[in-house]
Amino acid sequence: MEDLKKTNLYDFHKNNGAKFVPFAGYSMPVQYKNGVISEHLHTRSKAGFFDVSHMGQIKIWSKNNEKEKLIQELERLMPCDLYNLKENRQTYSLLTNSNGGVIDDLMIANKDFYFQLIVNASQKMTDYQHLKDNISQDFNIELEENKSLLAIQGPQSEDILTAINSNIKTMKFMDSIDISLADIDCSISRSGYTGEDGFEISVHNKNILQLVEILFKKSELLPIGLGARDSLRLEAGLCLYGNDLTSDITPVEANLNWVIHKRRRNQSASNIKFLGNTKILNQLEKGPIYLRIGLLPVEKAPMRTGSIIYLDNEGDTEIGIVTSGGFSPTLNKPISMGRIQSEYLEDLEKVYVKVRDKILPAIITKLPFIKTKYKI
Amino acid sequence: MKYTEEHEWLKPEKDIVIVGITEHAAEQLGDLVFVELPNKDLEVKKDQEIVVIESVKAASDILAPLDGVITEINDKIVDDPSIVNSDPLGEGWFFKMKLNNPSELDKLLDKEEYDKLTS
């Protein structure tokens, strides 16, 4: 087996009783001593600490200080409006392919002279190559492997960080600023992957252990593994790349129309076109073939990824597939997201899903499953 | 108490045995969120898949440890699967069964052999 990479917090996880699993080439904690459910509930009621250093941090800047040209280059690869993304702000976006599918979903921040992208661990090398292949050599593209990434999520996140630097309090959802925490240089965004208020902190590897020690001092912060990270994001109705988003699923099919910003929907000649724009904008206008929806299983059995969705309880008419599914600790019942042929969706309230040898009912429901707590 | 290589324990009680999963199994599985038990009076063959359990991470099957008939099931763990994690050897039992051939119990692992398997 290929050697797994470790983040700079591997020993920290080990000392906290982590169970490790291979994930995107890294050995990552899936849970700690208390288990997934307790970690999940702790994040929702207090605050959770996530090591997400396996994710990619990519910095892109102009060699000739031509930021406007850089915006043009980036807008050919993503459907977001970077002209109107203010400095020290970030937005959720996608790298699209020429078929309108998604290469990756990401956060892009406008940072003074450069843009910073936070991308999925599993896709970071693909993304890096895609950017290299599609952006002119007048720009530098750096995968910042000398940096770690942490997330603090949950209602106590703001208090934990403001106790270290009170300026944190002024940040709003999707702000992204350079700021120091106890004299350690950080880049902090008010964002996350749990539906809670929270922050993501980018910091040099050399300072990570010191920062972690400061964060845990006098706080009820607990380390949270990938298991609870998945159940938290699922409750918040957020997509997991590889499941709910893939190179064959368009943003419109993924129910992410809002990601295609208004200015980018205009197909006039003067406007920059993004990869796959024809298919994506056509689907925006006429509706997609498939659509991502939420599912609440009526019975107790979780409906997992890959389970087939039917129109009828006999399993005669296949209409879709479960793309994410598991148990919701907050609701104390199973939840799923699926992809359903949209021609069947009108007035459809209930579908049937094959779970092992049974075909069980599930109610189509709005996303997210829980109320999100972003500080907008 | 006897054990199987599939991480079940069997506790003889008069002419029936109580069956559950070991602490080691409960810990490895993580938080259980779903349990489906067989029907009472079901005749089962050794290694037949008769219980489905799902943790937060994945689903797995529990096999019938020996040939016999299910005499009682523990509905409490269906309502609250976390009992299996908190008390796997006690309140978290799965089912009771009457063995076709009680002497087959002798072929299963004793505690020392099971501990060796999981160490």
Image: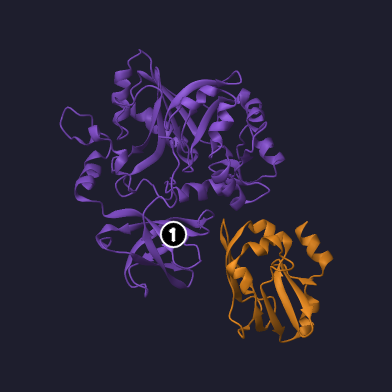
Residue A299 seen in the current view: yes
Task: Where is residue A168? Give x, y as percent.
Answer: 51, 25
Label 1: how many Cα within 10 Å (few below 14, some 14–19, many 20+): some
Quadrant housing residue B53 = bottom right
The foreground one among A97 and A14 is A14
- A81 sits to left or right of A90: left
Quadrant housing residue B116 = bottom right
Q: Residue furthest left?
A: A268
Q: Residue furthest right?
A: B112
Quarter occupied by the C terminus of chain A: top left
Q: Is residue A311 above or below residue A15?
A: below
Residue A146 seen in the current view: no
Task: Where is residue B62? Give x, y as percent.
Answer: 63, 70
Residue at the image position 45 percent from the left and 41 percent from the top:
A373
Q: Is residue B39 above or below residue A127?
A: below
Q: Residue furthest top?
A: A64
Q: Is residue A326 above or below residue A66?
A: below
The answer for which chain carries disc 1 is: A
- Amino acid at the residue labelled 1: Gly
Display colour scheme: by chain
- A104 sits to left or right of A40: left
Q: Which chain is purple?
A: A
- A352 sits to left or right of A182: left
Quadrant housing residue A109 = top left
Q: Is residue B76 above or below residue A253?
A: below
Residue at the image position 70 percent from the left and 44 percent from the top:
A17
Which residue is under mark 1?
Answer: A306
The foreground one among B46 and A357 is A357
Task: Where is residue B35? Give x, y as percent.
Answer: 58, 68
Chain B representation colour: orange
Task: Where is residue A19? Give x, y as percent.
Answer: 66, 47
